[in-house]
Image: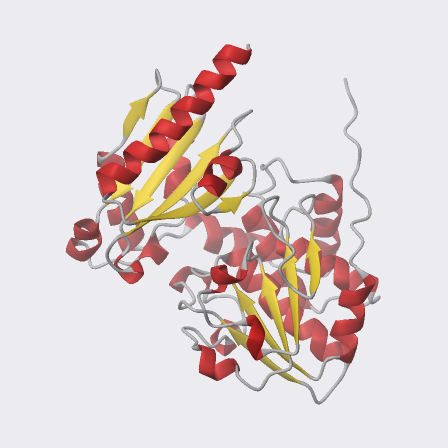
């Protein structure tokens, strides 16, 4: 049996450590449609900065509301969401969390508004767009990166901080099943559990309890399920009309894309959404894969990004059938290239 090399030390840059200690005011922003990792990392990063020095102003903000299923996390109500650019003016430093590029923050944090910008990301498609960048594709999650900052500063997380970090890690690793889960990830989780994190409650809130709106959208989406490339590609979709008829928003679609990977034959799952909050002419796409197909590379071709097995993008100026045809065509080409190379 081959031994996997342990990822033991993902070192944050010295410039980041200095900025966190010396800054006087901070805007902490995550990507649009915040998930548990974005929210957990944001809350724990703010708490870390407070512990590094008193009297500093910290504003947590997101372009979209905190989803209902994440409001169980303590202090989630302190995030200004939805926020505007004006609410962040006058702050010294902007910290972008889980944003492969600044636009992922939804336009609320414009670099020219700040003296210093910091980019903390764990996506392979992340870019060094800020003054200070810590883009670490080996990290399982943004929350794991914040955990490493706690450790670097020799802080033991409080129970509240530990719960935020754990929620982000367990969510972004899919309960420790995704490929970026490392020995370090499990060690971090073990240390957080030793601090008393209510892991059963967190798992139940993140993975078991589902809203009625989510179940209705799931049902409608599964009705649309089709298979392509001999059963190797699954496609689901939700139209603008689906959202309006079911009186639901995009926040209720979490994890629906993963159902496409349920059949053993499926290697790529695509989920197309005409989300009302995006406005007309915008198709949001979630991509998942198992095995060798790099969906982040495919998403990047459409202006998106993510991880090898989990990515997303937006397609503009095409209707839903056209967007589906474009993306399916690209996925089919990848399968063709793989078959040819084999």
- Establish if 17 lies above or below 243: below
Figure quadrant of the N terminus: top right
- Residue drawn at the location 76% of the way across and 57% of the way down: 148
Query: Percent from the top left, x then y, of residue 247?
Result: 20, 59
Residue 220 visible from this viewpoint: yes
Quadrant of residue 145 within the rendered picture: bottom right
Residue 263 visible from this viewpoint: no
- Establish if 181 lies above or below 1: below
Q: How many marks?
A: 0
Query: Percent from the top left, x then y, of residue 62?
Result: 47, 69
Nearer-the-camera pick, 284 or 79:
284
In this rendering, would 55 be left or right of 278? Answer: right
- Residue drawn at the location 30% of the way across and 24% of the way down: 227
Query: Percent from the top left, x then y, of residue 113?
Result: 56, 78
| Color style of the picture | secondary structure
Figure quadrant of the C terminus: top right
- Establish if 50 lies above or below 336: below
- Residue drawn at the location 39% of the way across and 23% of the way down: 332
Quadrant of residue 291 within the rendered picture: top right
In this rendering, would 327 be left or right of 27? Answer: left
- Residue drawn at the location 40% of the way across and 63% of the way down: 67
Quadrant of residue 279 within the rendered picture: bottom left
Nearer-the-camera pick, 132 or 147:
132
Query: Percent from the top left, x then y, of residue 232?
Result: 40, 21
């Amino acid at each position: 049996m081959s031994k996997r090399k342990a990822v033991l030390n993902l070192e944050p840059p010295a410039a980041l450590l200095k900025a966190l200690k010396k800054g006087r005011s901070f805007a902490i922003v995550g990507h649009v449609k915040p998930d548990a990792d974005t929210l957990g990392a944001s809350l724990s990063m703010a708490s870390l900065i407070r512990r590094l020095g008193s009297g500093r102003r910290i504003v947590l903000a997101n372009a979209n509301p905190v989803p209902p299923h994440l409001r169980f996390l303590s202090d989630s109500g302190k995030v200004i969401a939805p926020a505007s650019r004006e609410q962040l003016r006058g702050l010294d430093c902007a910290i972008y969390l889980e944003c492969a590029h600044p636009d992922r923050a939804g336009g609320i944090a414009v670099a020219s508004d700040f003296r210093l910008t910091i980019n903390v990301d764990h996506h392979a498609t992340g870019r060094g767009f800020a003054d200070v960048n810590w883009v670490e594709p080996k990290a399982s999650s943004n929350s794991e990166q914040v955990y490493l900052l706690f450790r670097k500063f020799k802080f033991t997380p409080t129970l509240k901080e530990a719960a935020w970090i754990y929620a982000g890690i367990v969510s972004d690793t899919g309960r420790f099943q995704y490929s970026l889960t490392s020995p370090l990830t499990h060690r971090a989780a073990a240390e957080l559990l030793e601090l008393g994190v209510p892991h059963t409650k967190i798992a139940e809130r993140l993975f078991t309890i589902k809203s009625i709106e989510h179940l209705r959208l799931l049902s409608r989406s599964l009705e649309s399920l089709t298979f392509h490339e001999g059963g190797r590609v699954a496609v689901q979709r939700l139209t603008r009309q689906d959202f309006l008829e079911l009186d639901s928003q995009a926040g209720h679609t979490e994890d629906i894309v993963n159902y496409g990977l349920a059949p053993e034959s499926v290697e790529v799952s695509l989920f197309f959404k005409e989300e009302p909050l995006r406005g007309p002419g915008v198709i949001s796409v979630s991509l998942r894969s198992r095995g060798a197909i790099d969906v982040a590379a495919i998403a990047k071709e459409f202006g998106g990004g993510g991880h090898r097995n989990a990515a997303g993008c937006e397609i503009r100026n095409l209707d839903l059938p056209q967007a589906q045809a474009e993306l399916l065509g690209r996925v089919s080409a990848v399968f063709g290239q793989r078959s040819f190379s084999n």
